[in-house]
Image (cartoon, rainbow, N blue to C red):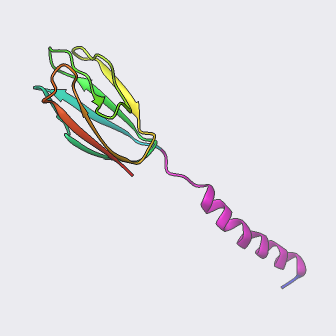
Amino acid sequence: MTDTTRRAAIATLLAAPLALSVTRAQAATHVVMIERFEYDPVNLQVSVGDTVTFTNLDGAPHTATATDGSFDTGLLTRNQSGSITVSAAGSFEYLCVFHPAMRGTITAT
């Protein structure tokens, strides 16, 4: 092995772990439909950084409002959507402020 070949091999070996550490998964988008006064799905698993879009298919207005205040879509009328980006790991319960029996959970890792 020549000195130049040896240097190239060492450079390749040193760069490989660096290239792996720079690679990151892209954030995903998840959809929650609001229909018949229910969230679908009721329980959603996501990763931190993912976006969740809530779409209201009901004639009545709805929201998706975290019980801990961490997110709120605001008022969604028929065929309107609202999105949130999950910024922390944990389990987040949410409800509709107009219909508190409507509940769901987002679990982020």
Q: Which residues are magenta?
A: 3-26
**52 or 4: nearer the viewer:** 52
Q: Residue at position x 27%, y 17% from top?
A: 76
In reply to whether residue 65 is colored magenta, the answer given is: no
Residue 63 falls left or right of residue 99: right
Residue 8 falls left or right of residue 86: right
- The percent position of residue 84, horizontal first and vertical second, equals 39, 31
- The percent position of residue 77, horizontal first and vertical second, equals 24, 14
Query: Picture quarter containing residue 80?
Result: top left
Task: State whether residue 57 is above or below residue 44.
Answer: above
- The percent position of residue 5, horizontal first and vertical second, equals 83, 77
Query: Picture quarter containing residue 21?
Result: bottom right
Task: State whether residue 87 is above or below residue 97.
Answer: below
**56 or 1: nearer the viewer:** 56
Magenta span: predominant SS is: helix
Quadrant into which the N terminus falls: bottom right
Question: Number of labelled discs?
Answer: 0
**5 or 70: nearer the viewer:** 70
**54 or 103: nearer the viewer:** 103
In reply to whether residue 7 is colored magenta, the answer given is: yes
Can you name the residue that lies furthest to the front here? 68
Can you name the residue that lies furthest to the bottom here? 1
Q: Residue at position x 31%, y 22% from top?
A: 81
- The percent position of residue 3, horizontal first and vertical second, equals 89, 80
Q: Residue at position x 21%, y 25% from top?
A: 96
